[in-house]
Amino acid sequence: MVVNMSLFAQLLRRSQPVSVVPRIQITSQTRLMGSVSAIDSSIFRTLFGTEEIRKVFDDRAYIQRCVDAEAALARAQSRCNVIPPDIGDMVTSKVTQSELDLDRLRHETEIVGYPILPLVRQLSAICGEEAGKYVHWGATTQDIMDLASVLQMKEGLVIVERLLKDVIKTLRDLSDKYKDTPMAGRTHLQHALPVTFGYKCAVWLSGFQRHLERLEQLKSRTLLVQFGGAAGTLASLGNGDDGLRVRRALAEELGLADPSITWHVARDGVAEIVNFLALMGGSMGKLALDIIIMSSNELGEVSEPFVPHRGASSTMPQKRNPISSEVILAASKILRSNAGLVLDGMVADFERASGPWHLEWVAVPESFVIAVGALFQTHFALSGLSVHNKQMLDNLHSTKGLIVAEAVMMGMAPYVGRQNAHDIVYAACKESIEKNLTLIECLLSKEEVTSKMEEERLRALCDPVNYLGASQQMVDDVLAVKY
């Protein structure tokens, strides 16, 4: 299948992230070259992510989310009469109509080690004496940084969900279209039993269906508001319920769930999200590996969409390398690596970690960019996948009937017992391999076989397309799953 390159570009441009509140303007320069990572490289970036997801997790977006958190906190505290009732709207209005000095913020962050104190200084000045003194009221640095991160992850999961559904739809179409297309099923890279290509696609699909279910379930567990103050106890707002009321109102302001207790050092929610992305990466990696092997010249069963010069070699003009699948496979490994980082980040000391939390600053944005990039590549590869039915059938018959040795064994078993049937068919298979004969030829030469079964029955057992088991029914069962 030939795919116009404009389709690839069109998929990359799809939709833009949404905002929580009007955006503050941040002055900065765009760095076009010089990145040390393939993920942010101006050369490799479209292979390992999309511009849409980068806009959710770049510096500008992160600082904006910190500002969103501070503004929402002021509004929540005004609603709860913890600070004067007009302050929340005043803070929100001021910070959304002003600019931050990003260079100053970066310089002061290098000194402090965190961006929130420098940010609060600028926001307080922007809000003026009356409202400025209430900015960051009762909060601590990690409250705001966690809120910013959760808001980014929330927005990122919207993109993940959309692309996940795109992959599911494409796999549904492939499963249905090729439900009855026979091919060789392989175990240990050897012919095992016949399957259909639709069955293979449905196996892939079933994993992504479960990922969509996992995604829906994890939202209420992981997208939690964070407001606990210095040690998580909300003591800065007194011994009553003011702190809890503010936290509840803050959750409503930001569209997050209100947890039962502060989670500064209970990082399972973050770990679950990143490990969910890694699980998706595992499914995408398995799919990609299958496509890579199936597209080899020796098998030639599928090909990635043909775009002129995509997958080309600098020295071998004939090459059409499965680039999307290769990128997906690499992405799946990166995602699994980052899953380990956030699990390490869970092991935090006492009521505020002395370091492991910092691992999330690397793992979370990188995992989202990598996962979305891999989902995009998966959708692209599958939506234009060329399926070579005839080659699948030729490969199925290439072992001269050996792929249905089990069928013959099970057919013989009622007459001679399973183990005796296994030994008889094993001998026939050995002869087939050594003498380059078909399995049916070897079976018909054995009196112990022909005395039990007629030739017509043997030939039917040796035809691979007759031994598909319940594979087609299982495809229907997968397609019946609602989401």
Image (cartoon, rainbow, N blue to C red):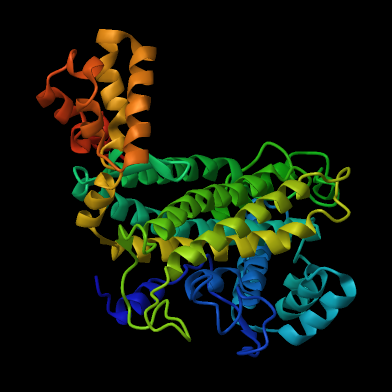
Quarter of the image for the C terminus: give it: top left
| Residue 427 place in picture, x, y as percent | 36, 26
Q: Residue at x 85, y 56 (%)?
A: 355
- In this view, the residue in front, 156 or 362, is 362
- In this view, the residue in front, 344 or 175, is 175
Determine whether, in the image, residue 222 is placed left or right of residue 410. Answer: right
Identify whether 166 is placed above or below 422. Answer: below
Identify whether 59 is placed above or below 203. Answer: below
Identify whether 259 is placed above or below 45. Answer: above
Identify whether 55 is placed above or below 392. Answer: below
Asked if residue 97 can be seen in this view, the reply is yes
Asked if residue 483 can be seen in this view, the reply is no
| Residue 468 place in picture, x, y as percent | 24, 33
| Residue 382 place in picture, x, y as percent | 33, 60
Q: How many marks?
A: 0
| Residue 449 place in picture, x, y as percent | 23, 18
Quarter of the image for the N terminus: give it: bottom left
Determine whether, in the image, residue 32 is placed left or right of residue 328. Answer: right
Q: Residue at x 60, y 67 (%)?
A: 89
Asked where in the image residue 334 lies, by quadrant, the reply is bottom right
Determine whether, in the image, residue 288 is placed left or right of residue 128. Answer: left
- In this view, the residue in front, 203 or 161, is 203
- In this view, the residue in front, 152 or 77, is 152
Q: Residue at x 76, y 58 (%)?
A: 359
